[in-house]
Amino acid sequence: MNASPTLNGQSPRFDTFLFAPVGEDRNGTLVSVLSALARFGVDPWHEAEALTDLPKTDAADRLDKMILALADVPSASADHHGIATRLIALLPQAGTRETGVRNMAGPMSLEQRNQVIVWTAVTLIFLIGHAMIPQSDTDASGGDPSGAVSAPLTRPGSQTP
């Protein structure tokens, strides 16, 4: 799944679960977990977090009861337990806190990890080398590094020896 921006400041780690379909309502509109939870007046992200913290069977039972109570989604009542089990499998594992783009993009391969290490080392060597070079306002010949020629300052009308 591609990285997605946050919705109302919420982490995208529950997107797969929250945007999964539950069934069609009486109007033929596809109802997602997000819209189903919102119909109960429940904050979908808080509920997803709570379900993640439960054992899988307890989470499936809790979600199963909610799906069964969706009176306006008759297609879900036929297989409410199967739908709940399928949806709970989409939640991230309890105790994992997927944050940042790296986790959303998936694990790094060994080659990618080595590239990061090499480029970090090259950058550090460059920065340390740059810091060790003495900085001077004049070039090696003692002149102005801009190449401008400077003349001694004299007062107007006075002569220089």
Image (spheres, helix red, strand yellow):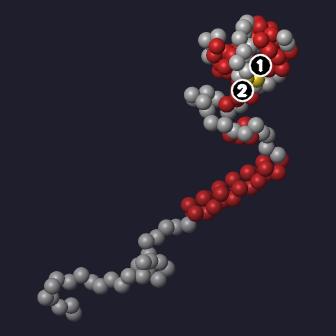
* Relative image position of residue 154 (x, y in whole percent): 20, 83
Residue located at (13% from left, 88% from top): 157
- Residue lying at the far front of the rendered structure: 27
> Residue at image x 72%, y 8%?
71
Q: Quadrant of the C terminus?
A: bottom left
Name the residue rendered at 49%, 79% in the picture.
Answer: 140
Instruction: Looking at the picture, tell me which residue is in the foreground, 100 or 23.
Output: 23
In terms of image quadrants, where is residue 6?
top right
- State the residue position of label 1: 23
Report the mark closest to the observer, 2 or 1. 1
Q: Can you identify the residue that label 2 sits on?
A: 19
Asked whether disc 2 touches disc 1, contact meaning CB atoms under 8 Å apart, the reply is no
Front one among 60 and 108: 60
- If the image is split into quadrants, where does the N terminus sit? top right
* Residue 17 shows in this picture: no
Looking at the picture, which amino acid does disc 1 mark?
A: Gly
Residue 43 location in percent, x, y? 62, 16
Vertical relation: 157 (above or below) 3: below
> Measured from the top left, where is residue 118 in percent x and y?
74, 55
Q: Is residue 98 left or right of residue 85?
A: left
Cα–Cα span, label 2 and label 1? 12 Å
Looking at the image, which is closer to me, 159 or 94? 94
Badge 2 amino acid: Phe
Indicate the secondary structure of the residue bearing disc 1. Answer: strand
Q: Report crowding for label 1: few under 14, some 14 to 19, many 20 or more residues within 10 A (C-alpha).
A: many
Q: In the image, is 146 to the left or to the right of 30?
A: left
**Local SS, label 2:** loop
Residue 11 - label: none
Q: Is 84 drawn above or below residue 101 in the view shown?
A: above
Tell me the residue at 17%/91% (across/down). Answer: 159
